[in-house]
Amino acid sequence: MATNSNNLESTTLVISAISNQTTLITINVVAQLPLKLVKGSYASWLAQFDSLLYRYDPVGYVDGSFPCPLTIIQATPTSSHEPNPAYKLWMRQDHLLRLAIIGSQILNLKTTLARTNMDTMSVSEYLMTIKHMADELALIGASLSEDEILLHVLNGLSPENTKNLVLPCVQGILLFHLRNYMTS
């Protein structure tokens, strides 16, 4: 369960200690997964994540050994079809586990976005790179405001790119309009 939908880094992950158990335990993802998945850290991140998976036993959700139960319980001669509570539990835990994996990507994307600069890119390439990362963050629940995106764009410009920009005029415009200011 997310403590704040816009801050998945502090997501609380709820998973079952044993696959067939009906009770849930809470794990603080920030405390349990201190290493975030960033370029060059995959091996360490994977070892950390594997340890978490084996410790709390949600491995079956990842490797497929604990498949999704049927949505309904098969009818017996004395009862009709009923919703399967195990299905609902399985779906909740599966989605919460996905959130933990996604949450470890947020820091990487935000760091990459903060370090992105125009360098040798064209204006269009640079703006599309920023837009792509902002879109990726939005897809995983960490949306940026237009002001935050604009700050990332401006922070990645070199002094020669900014000499034609007058910051008060730029404030409040959309990314696709910024291209015209930068190329004039």
Image (cartoon, rainbow, N blue to C red):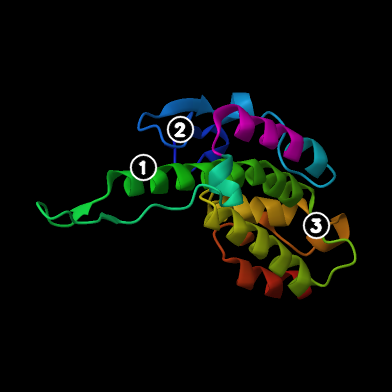
Amino acid type of the residue tagged 2 in the rendering = Ser
Q: Quadrant of the C terminus?
A: bottom right
Magenta-drawn segment: 46-58
Query: Which of the labelled discs sits on residue 16, or is there none?
Result: 2
Asked if the magenta segment contains residue 47, the reply would be: yes
Question: Nearest the camera: 65 or 108?
Answer: 65
- Mark 1 and mark 2 in contact (Cβ < 8 Å)? yes
Q: Say if 12 sits above or below 115 in the image.
A: above
Q: Amino acid at mark 1?
A: Leu
Determine which residue is flagged by label 1: 89
Q: CA distance from mark 3 to mark 2?
A: 48 Å
Q: What residue sits right under mark 3 in the picture?
A: 157
Q: Earlier in the sequence, mark 3 or mark 2?
A: 2
Query: How far apart are labels 1 and 3 at the CA level?
Result: 48 Å
Tell me if 105 is positioned left or right of 172 in this view: right
Secondary structure of the residue carrying numbered label 3: loop
Residue 61 lies, in percent from the top left, at 53, 46
